[in-house]
Image (spheres, rainbow, N blue to C red):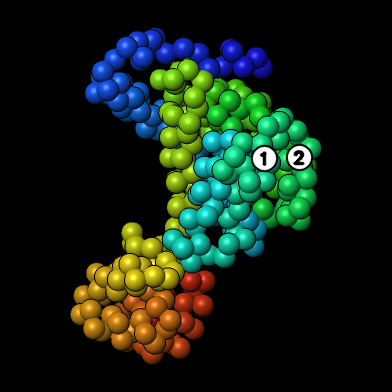
Amino acid sequence: MDLGSLVSETRNADTLDLDSLSTLEMVSKFNQQDATVAAAVSLTLPQVAKAVDAAAAALSAGGRIIYMGAGTSGRLGVLDASECPPTFGVSHDLVIGLIAGGPGAMFKAVEGAEDDEQLGVSDLQGLALSPDDMVIGLAASGRTPYVIGALRYARQHGCRTAAISCNPGSPIAREAEIAISPVVGPEALTGSTRLKSGTAQKLVLNMISTGAMVKIGKVWQNLMVDMKATNIKLVDRARRMVCEATGCTPQQADDALGQVDYEAKTAILMILADLPGSEARERLARHGGFLRAALNER
């Protein structure tokens, strides 16, 4: 697939005058282009839903979610993976972001790393890939060899796979069982896929990781009840979460949270079911960590 033929690489007729606009006119153009992204993503929601279900199934089976990408796409995967532990209380090795060129490529481009299919394979081998894992390849162009090699290897090993690109019918889409291709059109700045394409990929990643965590019991109602209260701001958030969920006072929330190492989910169950901390933990364990099911236990 020739790079110049890709939708994401063509020139945008609406921004040909970008360098002659006033600052306000210029940022208005950017904003107008960005406003089209959510609509493009909405057309891919059936595929996104399949990816959420596949990711949840992988986690439920003891597997991991592994993002693979290069450049902006790789950085977005690493970002999403890094935010899962504090948000959902999961271990750092449950959602993993791999970027072509290694961790240093997050901050400085590693020339040529994305052009090596074998490098994608080697990075997965370094994780001792399991058939229970799900590998999600990210490439705005849809043609990055690093991602193609990784997805092909993952499928050969029986993993669930998904591909996120911004060009229809891309090579990575053909390598994955689930293809998510929001077509956002030409960028405001020709070829700069950190713009609309990057925004589209971030929207999709938000839905996949958050949706999968909802599916495995990390969320109750719309509260992140497994959040780790690791600083003053998050301790306050945990307190407010318990108050909102139970109607208790801040002091009652603090008393419950203090007994269970500031586990908001456990504190909520303690208050609503009138249980001591140890019994609340045991009940949650019986229900696989699902607070709604634990509350409904008779």
Q: Which mark is residue 287?
A: none
Residue located beneath label 2 in the image: 119
Tell me residue 18's x, y (percent).
35, 15
Front one among 63 and 57 = 63
Asked where in the image residue 269 lies, by quadrant, the reply is bottom left
Q: Nearer the viewer, residue 172 or 99?
A: 99
In the depicted structure, whether residue 268 falls above or below residue 107: below
Q: Earlier in the sequence, mark 1 or mark 2?
A: 1
Answer with the quarter of the image where residue 58 lies: bottom right
x, y percent for residue 68: 63, 42
> Label 2 neighbourhood size at 10 Å, few (<14), some (14-19), many (20+)?
many
Secondary structure found at label 2: helix
Q: Is residue 244 left or right of residue 192?
A: left
Q: Quadrant of the C terminus?
A: bottom left
Circle 1 — which element? loop
Which quadrant of the rendered structure holds the N terminus?
top right
Q: Give the residue drawn at x 54%, y 36%.
A: 72
Residue at image position (34%, 76%) is 268
Q: CA distance from mark 1 to mark 2?
A: 7 Å
The residue carrying mark 1 is: 100
Asked if the residue at tag 2 contacts the one at tag 1, i.e. Cβ–Cβ closer than 8 Å, the answer is yes
Residue name at image x 46 percent, y 82 percent: 281
> What kind of residue is marked 1?
Ala
Q: Amino acid at mark 2?
A: Leu
Q: Judge the density around disc 1: few (<14), some (14-19), many (≥20) Cα neighbours within 10 Å.
A: many
| Res 60 visible | no
Q: Quadrant of residue 60?
A: bottom right
Left or right, 108 with reference to 213: right
Q: Position of residue 123 (x, y in %)?
A: 73, 47
Q: How many marks?
A: 2
